[in-house]
């Protein structure tokens, strides 16, 4: 038996037609775009000369004219406490230490961390709230900077999910499924829309430091993985120490010219392998090698903030000078946006306050409050908010009842999937509105529920994508980010 011939004969129809279509399509595209398709010089923003035309992506996308060209997702990993931040519940003051009524809980699922408690005492928020902006949106005293954005964002108070524990919940909202292995939101955008900057990744991820001084839930690179999409669509993590991207620097004794010759030789071998076996992952490998070479110039320029004016640094606050902080990540997100990177996601951990809300929650808020305000304001001042979507939120909310010991000054809260807040600002979003309402206990949705699939459908819609039409064949199914059940963009917040 000839194993090479066996492998060639096992080439799938999809690989075959993809291979032949690629050859014809590449020739046609090159004749239409000329030097632009071959990646000429750089624009002042750091993009290629073809920056006005996305490269890659699927034919026919976007499905309709997009409001947003790019998105930045500020992800508060751990589950921020909605009734301490955005969901003002003054009636709970009279319920202090009283049992959560069975009529409110309605036998809903609890985690094993509190299901064994003898009682579920109500813990009102100890923090003051005030109305802000022309919208009159209630915001906690813990978020004085974000409170200034109430006329810029749409606050959804009624997002909900079926997942009640961290790993399945964050996997669910990031990939559309509670089990690992599916493509992430950023990977879907890269796959569907392609890139507008050939010198930087289409999808960039940062994990910021946090100040609550306690262990946080682990996060995994599968949250920005490409699943069963080609691996070139996975997120690229920017690091705060050493090389911003792993193995970005040349090894000692290897200069740029040597690196270029080495890549050319490797690429010739990879092209030969693709001609033999038609494996799409070989093309992905070629593209990733070339991207890595270009990033040796583009990434150091991106991460060097020495050219930022002092007034911009002051806007983000003193933490911006410390690599790895949320403030530094937010500034880098703006720099990525102005370089036409399609999707940026910042994970900020430590929001899992099962105890010591009074000690830990203020520190977490201080990490992100000013920087979130600065990012939106910075984008707005540069005209970038007109075509950039910004999202802020976590994977679920917290319980109104206390976990552990309850006092007037401190308390803990368990996971709560039935309602939690997310705000969205920028391109495609109606500013200065509050959407949806919860009951007096911030336990159940009273009006306008928004499932996390609806939330992701809304994000895709702002970028010109009909979520029902972005899918890929996998294991005999048409799989999509938003699942197979009926879901819709949240029309009430769309501009």
Image (tube, helix red, strand yellow):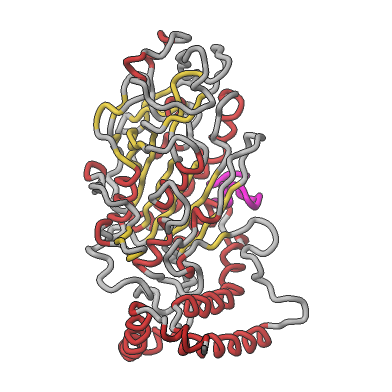
In this picture, is 144 found above or below 379? above
Report the residue at 43% width, 30% height from top.
416
Q: Residue 269: x and y, percent?
A: 56, 89
In the displayed image of the protein, which residue is found farthest to the right? 253
Q: Residue 247: x and y, percent?
A: 66, 69
Q: Nearer the viewer, residue 306 or 205?
A: 205
Count how many numbered circles sit on residues in the image.
0
> Is residue 40 visible from the viewing direction of this image?
no
> Is residue 281 visible from the viewing direction of this image?
yes
Q: Which residues are magenta?
A: 311-328
Q: Residue 18: x and y, percent?
A: 35, 81
Q: Main secondary structure of the magenta part?
A: helix
Report the residue at 34% width, 75% height from top.
53
Report the residue at 30% width, 28% height from top.
445
In this picture, is 114 found above or below 477? above
Q: Is residue 44 left or right of residue 243?
A: left
Report the residue at 31% width, 89% height from top.
28
Q: Is residue 461 left or right of residue 142?
A: left
* In the image, residue 325 lies in the stretch drawn in magenta: yes
* In the image, residue 472 lies in the stretch drawn in magenta: no
Q: Nearer the viewer, residue 6 or 197?
A: 6
Q: Nearer the viewer, residue 156 or 5?
A: 5
In this picture, is 193 found above or below 405? below
Q: Residue 55: x and y, percent?
A: 38, 75
């Amino acid at each position: 038996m000839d194993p090479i011939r066996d492998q060639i004969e096992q080439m799938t129809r999809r690989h075959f037609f993809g291979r032949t279509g690629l050859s014809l399509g590449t020739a046609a595209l090159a004749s239409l775009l000329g030097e632009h398709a071959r990646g000429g010089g750089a624009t002042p923003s750091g993009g290629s000369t073809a920056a006005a035309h996305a490269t890659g992506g699927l034919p026919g996308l976007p499905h309709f004219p997009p409001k947003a060209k790019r998105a930045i997702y500020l992800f508060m990993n751990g589950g921020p406490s909605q009734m301490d931040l955005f969901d003002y519940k003054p009636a709970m003051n009279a319920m202090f230490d009283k049992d959560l009524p069975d009529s409110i809980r309605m036998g809903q699922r609890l985690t094993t961390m509190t299901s064994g408690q003898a009682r579920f005492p109500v813990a009102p928020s100890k923090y003051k709230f005030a109305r802000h902006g022309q919208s009159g949106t209630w915001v906690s005293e813990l978020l004085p900077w974000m409170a200034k954005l109430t006329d810029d964002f749409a606050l959804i108070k009624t997002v909900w999910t079926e997942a009640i524990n961290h790993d399945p919940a964050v996997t669910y909202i990031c990939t559309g499924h509670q089990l690992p292995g599916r493509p992430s939101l950023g990977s879907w955008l890269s796959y569907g829309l392609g890139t507008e900057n050939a010198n930087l990744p289409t999808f960039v991820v940062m994990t910021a430091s946090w100040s609550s001084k306690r262990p946080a839930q682990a996060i995994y690179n599968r949250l920005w993985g490409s699943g069963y999409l080609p691996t070139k669509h996975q997120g690229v993590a920017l690091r705060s120490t050493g090389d911003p991207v792993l193995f970005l620097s040349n090894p000692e004794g290897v200069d740029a010219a040597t690196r270029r010759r080495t890549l050319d030789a490797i690429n010739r071998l990879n092209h030969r392998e693709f001609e033999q076996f038609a494996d799409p992952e070989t093309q992905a490998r070629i593209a990733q090698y070339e991207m890595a070479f270009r990033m040796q110039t583009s990434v150091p320029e991106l991460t060097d903030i020495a050219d930022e004016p002092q007034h911009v640094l002051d806007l983000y606050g003193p933490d911006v000078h410390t690599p790895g902080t949320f403030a530094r990540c937010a500034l880098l997100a703006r720099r990525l946006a102005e370089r036409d990177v399609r999707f940026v996601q910042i994970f900020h951990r430590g929001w899992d306050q099962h105890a010591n809300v009074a000690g830990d929650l203020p520190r977490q808020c201080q990490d992100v409050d000013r920087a979130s305000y600065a990012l939106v304001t910075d984008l707005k001042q540069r005209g970038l908010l007109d075509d950039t979507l910004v999202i802020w939120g976590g994977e679920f909310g917290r319980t109104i009842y206390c976990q552990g010991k309850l006092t007037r000054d401190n308390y803990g809260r368990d996971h709560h999937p039935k309602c939690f807040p997310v705000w969205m600002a920028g391109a495609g979003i109606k500013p200065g509105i509050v959407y949806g309402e919860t009951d007096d206990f911030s336990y159940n949705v009273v009006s306008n529920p928004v499932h996390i699939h609806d939330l992701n459908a809304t994000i895709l819609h702002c970028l010109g994508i009909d979520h029902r039409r972005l899918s890929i064949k996998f294991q005999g199914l048409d799989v999509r980010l938003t699942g197979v059940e009926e879901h819709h963009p949240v029309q009430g917040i769309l501009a």
